[in-house]
Image: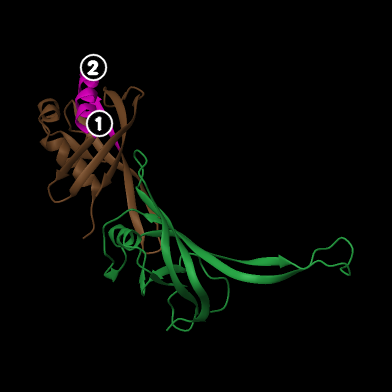
Chain colours: A green, B brown
């Protein structure tokens, strides 16, 4: 798709089902480095080689027990908690879901889950999926 | 099904005894009729809030305003107090509407209505439906 993608369209899916009433999501990846500075290195600059890659996803949304929104199936707060407490692996994708558009996918576990309930405001949920294994770049089916 | 939150306001004002005893159902939308007696209540929607989520735009409450008219200040204040007692922290299922939650926001003594020869008090409330 040409142009800048709207953040509204990018979502985290668990087994092909999006997390419901989501308001924000991020895919965060990083790589370890191991320093390889040696006596012949250019003065003043470090040198490194890449080591292991790792990543996590974070998600936020409004707290709801709904499993459908506008006739579309979504993951409710109960579904998310069940995966967390059972330590069940998440088969996640980070994508717009539009056929042919870029999709990032992998496996992971929900390692953090927070529920917030401020007075006279909407209740919220947020959490973290720690990625286990490789992140794959592909296209949405 | 589209929800009209302001109709919940009308329904509550008509059915709450404390309000009815004073207004005798002189409750009108948006404009006070020239033939209206006193005390009377005019209600109207001021704003609607919406929240954007990745699934849909969802309703996040409405603001409505009540204009209370009476022939003297004491009567106006009594009506204001009765309505405020009704609406402040209102949390109930309203027939054909759903679970309605109302919060008091503000009350002002408005300028005397010369044409109507009436005291006017304005109250603001927020309303959510779940």
Nearer to me, B121 or B127: B127
| Residue B75 lies in the magenta stretch | yes
Residue A102 drawn at (x, y percent): 51, 79
Q: In this rendering, is residue A107 above or below B130?
A: below
Q: In this rendering, is residue A21 above or below B7?
A: below
Q: Could you say which quadrant of the image residue B57 lies in?
A: bottom left
Compared across the picture, whether B13 is left or right of A95 comes to left
For marks 1 and 2, give the one nearer the viewer.
1
Q: Could you say which quadrant of the image residue B114 lies in?
A: top left
Q: Could you say which quadrant of the image residue A45 lies in?
A: bottom right
Q: Residue furthest front?
A: A39
Same chain for the residues under marks 1 and 2 in the image: yes
At 47% from the left and 75% from the top, the residue drawn is A105
Q: Which mark is residue A23?
A: none
Question: How dense is the environment of label 1, judged by Cα within 10 Å: few (below 14), some, or many (20 and up)?
Answer: some
Q: What's the magenta region? A: B65-89
At 41% from the left and 61% from the top, the residue drawn is A110
| Residue B7 lies in the magenta stretch | no
Reading the image, the residue beneath label 2 is B72
Compared across the picture, whether B81 is left or right of A45 comes to left
Dominant SS in magenta: helix
Q: Secondary structure at mark 1?
A: loop
The quarter of the rendered structure image containing the N terminus of chain B is: bottom left
Nearer to me, A119 or B36: A119
Reading the image, the residue beneath label 1 is B88
Residue B58 drawn at (x, y percent): 34, 56
Does the rendering let one see residue A95?
Answer: no
At 23% from the left and 15% from the top, the residue drawn is B74
Compared across the picture, whether B49 is left or right of B13 comes to right
User: In 3D space, how far apart are the residues under numbered discs 1 and 2 (Cα atoms)?
Assistant: 24 Å
Does the rendering let one see residue B119?
Answer: yes
Q: Are marks 1 and 2 in contact (CB under 8 Å)?
A: no
């Amino acid at each position: 798709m040409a142009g800048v993608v709207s953040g509204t369209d990018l979502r985290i899916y668990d087994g092909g089902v999006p997390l419901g009433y989501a308001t924000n999501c991020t895919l965060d990846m990083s790589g370890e480095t191991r320093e390889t500075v040696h006596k012949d290195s250019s003065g003043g600059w470090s040198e490194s080689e890449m080591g292991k890659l790792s990543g996590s996803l974070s998600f936020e949304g409004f707290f709801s027990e709904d499993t459908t929104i506008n006739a579309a199936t979504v993951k409710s707060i109960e579904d998310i908690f069940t995966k967390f407490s059972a330590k069940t692996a998440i088969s996640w994708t980070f994508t717009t879901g539009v056929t042919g558009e870029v999709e990032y996918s992998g496996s992971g576990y929900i390692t953090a889950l927070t529920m917030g309930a401020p007075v006279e405001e909407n209740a919220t949920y947020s959490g973290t999926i720690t990625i286990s294994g490789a992140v794959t770049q592909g296209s949405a089916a | 099904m589209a929800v009209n939150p302001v109709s919940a306001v009308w329904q509550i004002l008509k059915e709450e005894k404390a309000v009815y005893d004073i207004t005798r159902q002189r409750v009108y939308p948006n404009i006070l009729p020239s033939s209206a007696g006193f005390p009377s209540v005019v209600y109207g929607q001021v704003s609607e809030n919406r929240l954007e989520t990745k699934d849909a735009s969802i309703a996040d409450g409405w603001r409505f305003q009540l204009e209370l008219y009476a022939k003297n200040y004491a009567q106006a204040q009594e009506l204001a107090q009765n309505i405020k007692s009704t609406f402040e922290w209102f949390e109930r299922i309203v027939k054909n509407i759903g679970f309605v939650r109302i919060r008091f926001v503000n009350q002002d003594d408005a300028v005397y209505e010369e044409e109507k020869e009436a005291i006017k008090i304005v109250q603001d409330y927020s309303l959510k439906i779940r």
